[in-house]
Each structure stands twice: as structure tokens, then as C-alpha cells.
Amino acid sequence: MWGQAEVTKFAEKHRLGEGARADLKKMFDSFVTKSRRRVTVRVPATTANMGPGFDCAGMALDVWNELTVERASSFSMEIEGEGAQKLPRDKSNLVVKGVEAAYKYIEQEVPTLRYYTLNRIPFAKGMGSSSAAIVSGILAGLALAGFNLQVKNEEELLQIATNLEGHPDNVAPCIYGGFQLGIHNGSRWWTDRVTMPHGLMCVVFCPDHATETSEARLLLKEQIAMQDAIFNCGRVAVLVAAFATGNMEWLRHGTEDALHQEQRAPIHPHLKPLIRAALDAGAHGACLSGAGPAVIAFTSGRCGDVTAQKASEREEFNVAEALIAAADEIGCPGHVLITKPVEHGGYIVSETKVLDPENRRSRIHYVQD
Ligand SMILES: Nc1ncnc2c1ncn2[C@@H]1O[C@H](COP(=O)(O)OP(=O)(O)O)[C@@H](O)[C@H]1O
Ligand SMILES: N[C@@H](CCOP(=O)(O)O)C(=O)O
């Protein structure tokens, strides 16, 4: 680790003049104050489309992946949790691609890094694991370089991440949290938040099998009928209105879709029976989560900690049981995650500066939870 002593030694060895010495010291000080040695970030799962909001509506869920990157002498990648058996441990990993995109944006060389990821977001199930990987990498890369971004108006992070991932419906809620609507306005990605009602719960059936979004997109039609476009315009308006007003009973129609669910049904034969089961058990609405195979149902009534609340008041449990029963009946093994939306998106949990150990500031750490 370089400290002030090394800077002085370097200046003496290379017989730098006063001006060059001052410039070197300034450069070193700026690197030391801005750059980080180690950064940990956390990013949420997301449920995209929410039925009719194909490629434009998505919501952050309270399920988090954690990524730590640290400057090191050689590249390494450790992966624990979801997808650990399948994910590449080389530079083709999307987390690395995210870090590279961040450094490209700030026009700096990517340092040699050690990666450690703890994945809790179900892998390739339709809960935004790919955008979580990209966003975590970008956030970690920017924090490591000590680079701050404009988040209002230009929304630089959204531009970098969506250009890499392709769709704002996962990326926007992963960055900003909450229920987000995203579009491309012809020159840049744009997103904004829709209010979320209090007490909303999400019951997600995760089949044991996975499907890649790229595979599920191949099933979509190039052309759509006018009546399907009209159907979805109305449904997505009702979806947004249901959230904004808190009239959750509107979600029954607000989660209906004609643009992608029917087309994807051949690879998701469990979809229709599970939607039916969730609605019959009292869910306000249900749909495919992202490109699937997970199916998400919306319920309400959460009040404080769910484990302390009376079972008869907890609609989500009945819906979860109905989903499992319906899935068992059609031979689609899986499990249910009961979770809730989160208002905040990805964030930096902790960071350590590039300071020599004698520097008092090396003992100051930002910690967030
Ligand atoms: N935690 C992760 N770290 C790195 N890459 C990931 C991670 N999770 C997913 N990916 C990448 O994203 C792909 C899955 O993306 P996708 O099919 O869109 O699933 P999801 O619906 O979960 O986003 C994987 O094949 C892998 O390349
Ligand atoms: N709008 C996309 C959303 C993909 O979400 P994912 O969580 O399955 O990656 C699509 O429907 O293809």
C-alpha cells in the first residue's frame, strides 16, 4: 500500500522538481480521498411486467444479493447461494461486466479485483437476478473509484445499467426501489415512481426449474393485434391506478395481460392454473413474474411483523398454500417466497478507503444496513 512516505521516496528517486512533486502529491491525495479499497453493495430482487406493463413496469422486492469487491493482486471470484453451481467464475460474469461498464463510463482502467457474492435472489426464475448482478457491479465499480453520479434528470446510473441489461422494468426498481415505470424517450432512459399502498404483500411461487429470459423472449410475436394493444393499455392504466389509489381490488384486471403471458404459456404450463388458484384463494391479482417461470400474487393486510400478526388476518398464507397445492396437482415442484415491496433500491453497505494504516482516516468506515 502506498503512503505519503512512498510518494516522497518516488519523488526523490526520480528527482522530481517542486512543481512535479506538488502535482504528484495532489494526484495521490485525490486518489486517497476518493478511491475505496473495498466496497460492499446490496441490490434487491425485482418483479418485472406485473402483468400488462411489459418491458416498462417493475417493483423492487425485499430479497437482496450482496457483492463485495476488493483491490487485490490477482483476479478471483467466490460465489455463494443462488446460482452458485451455474454462474461463471471468470470475467464473463455479469457482476464483472457491471464493474467494467462503470470504469468505462469514468474512463479509467479497471483495477485487479477480488469478488465475493452472496446471492439470495432466485436464479433465472423471473426475479431480476441478471439486472441485480449488473447494477451491483456498476454500483461497486463507481464506489470503488470514488465516482459520484447525477441521479436526478440525467439519471446516469439508469442509462449505464439499462443500456447493458436492455430493459428498464428490472433495472429501474433495482436502482431506485419501489414501483417504477420506465421508458426510452428517444434519446435516453427515463423512469419514475408510482406510490405503493401500505401493507402490500407479494407471494411468489418459484418452480424448481429455471428459464432464461432470452429463451422466453423468443416466444414473443413480432406483431400484435390492435385489440391486444387496447387490452394492455387499459390494463396497465388500471394497474397504476390501483397502486396509486390503494384500491387493490382493481388489481384483478390490473394484472391481466395479452402481450406476453399467453405467448409464453407453452414453456410455463403452470402459469394459468397458479393464477387461478391465487385468485380463488383471495389474492387481489396474479401474473408471471418477469419472464417467468415464477408466478407472483399480490395480497394486502400486512400490519407490523407478519409472524406476530394473527393468521386469520394474513391473506398471504392462504394464497401461498393454494399455490403449492395447485402446483403439486399439475406436477410442478417448487416453493413459495412471501415477501414485500421495498421503497429503496441498491445501496452501498460499507466501504473502506485506500489509506495507509497510519492515517487516522483509515479507521473511519461508512456502514449502512
Ligand atoms: N448473481 C449473478 N451473478 C452474475 N450473473 C448472474 C447472476 N444472476 C444471474 N446472472 C446472469 O443472468 C442470467 C439469467 O438472467 P435471466 O434469464 O434474465 O434471469 P432473471 O429472470 O433471474 O433475471 C444468467 O444466465 C447469468 O448469466
Ligand atoms: N420485460 C422483461 C422482463 C424480464 O424479467 P426477468 O426478471 O425475467 O429477467 C421480459 O418480460 O422479457
Image (tube, rainbow, N blue to C red):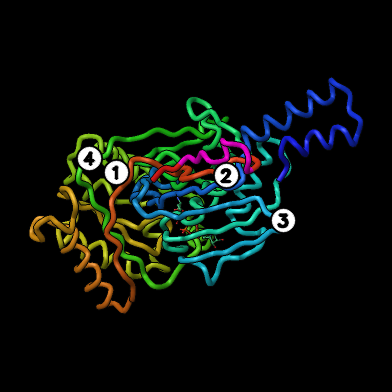
Residue 40 - label: none
- Dot 4: element: loop
Mark 1 = which residue?
A: 235
Pinpoint residue 213: horizontal percent, then vertical percent.
49, 59
Residue 97 on the magenta span: no
From which residue to which does the magenta span run?
357-366
Residue appearing at x 30%, y 57% in the figure: 296
Left or right: 97 with respect to 272? right
Pinpoint residue 199: horizontal percent, then vertical percent.
20, 46
Mark 4 = which residue?
A: 197
Q: Nearer the viewer, mark 1 or mark 3?
A: 3
Q: Nearer the viewer, mark 2 or mark 1?
A: 2
- Dot 2: element: helix
Compared with 350, 16 (above or below) is above
Q: CA distance from mark 4 to mark 1?
A: 18 Å
Q: Amino acid at mark 4?
A: Pro
Pinpoint residue 274: horizontal percent, then vertical percent.
26, 66
